[in-house]
Image: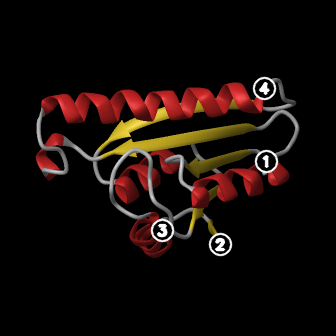
Amino acid sequence: MRRILVGFDGSQGSEKALLKALSLIEEGGELILLAVIPSKAEKSFVDSNAYRLARKRAHQIVQEKIREIGDTFFDVTGVVEVGDAADKIIEVANKKDCDLIILGRRGQSEISPSTLGSVAEKVVTFAYKPVMVVK
């Protein structure tokens, strides 16, 4: 696989998805770590400060993971988006012309309180790209 998108939120499920992606990515390929935080309009946040903290945490999680992956034979890109997680995963996968989307089946996100299970189900249902859900 030349370009793989991993829905990454710091949960155990997203860590497993990343491990699978690392085993599948081709030399010279690109691994995209995508973290999505809900928009303020979704009322997932009590106030603006909580929203800013979630956004900051999403960037930290992605950057820490990129540093942890280190030097590789492929590119690693971190992306943080705001909105519905499933919609953003599908949108970025299409925009970046990904060969595969890999998601964890379920997990407690370090970014927002929603579980990845419902996100994975929606991505599998509506994505036009191949999707792998890792248990």
- Image-based side of 46 in relation to 58, left or right: left
The numbered mark, 1 or 2, whose residue comes first in the sequence reads 1
- Image-based side of 67 in relation to 39, left or right: right
| Residue beneath disc 2 | 135
The numbered mark, 1 or 4, whose residue comes first in the sequence reads 1
Of residues 133 and 112, the one nearer the viewer is 112
Residue at x 59% of width, y 61% of height:
13
Residue 45: x %, y % from top left: 17, 44
As drawn, the label of residue 70 is: 4
Q: Can see residue 16?
A: yes
Residue 76: x %, y % from top left: 69, 31
Q: Nearer the viewer, mark 1 or mark 2?
A: 2
The numbered mark, 1 or 3, whose residue comes first in the sequence reads 1
As drawn, the label of residue 133 is: none
Q: Secondary structure at mark 1?
A: helix
Q: Amino acid at mark 1?
A: Leu
